[in-house]
Amino acid sequence: MQCQDEAAETTGFSLHCDPGLSRLSNRRRTRVPPEKAPGGVPMADPLTVGLRTRLSYTARINNGMAEFAQYQSRHLSVLPRAARLILRKPRVALMVLRMTSWVAVVSVAIKALPLPRAMRLLEPHVRSVAPCTPAKSQAIASLLDSLLATNLLFLTPTCWKRAPVLRRFLALEGVETRIVFGVRRDGDEQLTGHAWIEADGKPLLEPTTPEYKITFTYPS
């Protein structure tokens, strides 16, 4: 056999070569082509697929834990601030509590009731005779914006929550306004909406002038 002759020429000894071992060695040196699917596309290695799936699952878990930790740290920090507000400014804390309750009401009502009826729920029955100063109106709006910016449960910076609650608290201070809902088309024909309040036909306590097509006002 060839392997015997090569070994004898090299070492000077006669060796017996097992044909099975020779075939096994040749088989190991031969690269086995990957299996192919019926369409002719190479099939993925199950071990590689399983490893990638496990890594992807682990990454999602890590991302979820990081988001939860961020959520927890952000919302737990609200408690000390609320405690300091109650101790230092109890009247402001009481207004924040009232605003929170009305944000909860409008969050449920605007999804469960027709829009005019939902707006009527926030209509105040008692109003101040003399309107408050612009500085106090700005303070009320800033307090409500800070409350909605906490992003805690239903407290989210959403315009259709802000407008009705702000209108109610301004009405309690003698400032008459109306709620306006509007829509417009942005780029890519995307339809967006906004809600704000107006006084004497002009937007009130808005960072920029809303440019929307009016679809609903309350009171009409």
Image (cartoon, helix red, strand yellow):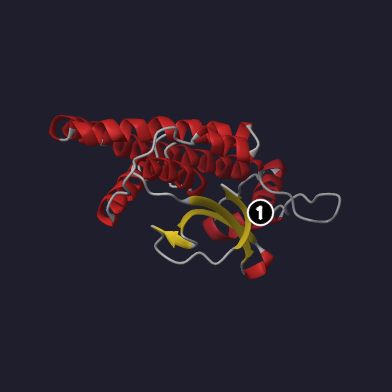
| Rendered location of residue 25, percent (x, y) | 65, 49
Observer-nearest residue: 69 or 11? Answer: 69
The residue that mark 1 highlights is 3
Relative height, residue 33 to residue 24 (above, below): below
| Residue sticking out furthest to the left | 88
Secondary structure at numbered mark 1: helix
Could one spot residue 190 in this view of the protein? yes
Seen in the image, is 148 located left or right of residue 41? left
Residue 145 rendering spot, x and y as whole percentages: 36, 48
Mark 1: amino acid: Cys
User: In the image, residue 14 lies at what x, y percent?
Assistant: 60, 49
Q: Which of the 4 image quarters holds residue 16?
A: top right
Label 1 neighbour load within 10 Å: few <14, some 14-19, many 20+: few
Looking at the image, which is closer to me, 157 or 161?
161
- Residue 156 visible to an observer of this rendering: no
- Using residue 115 as the reference point, say whether residue 73 is left or right of it: left
| Residue at x 46%, y 37% (from the top left corner) | 61
Q: Nearer the viewer, residue 69 or 26?
A: 69
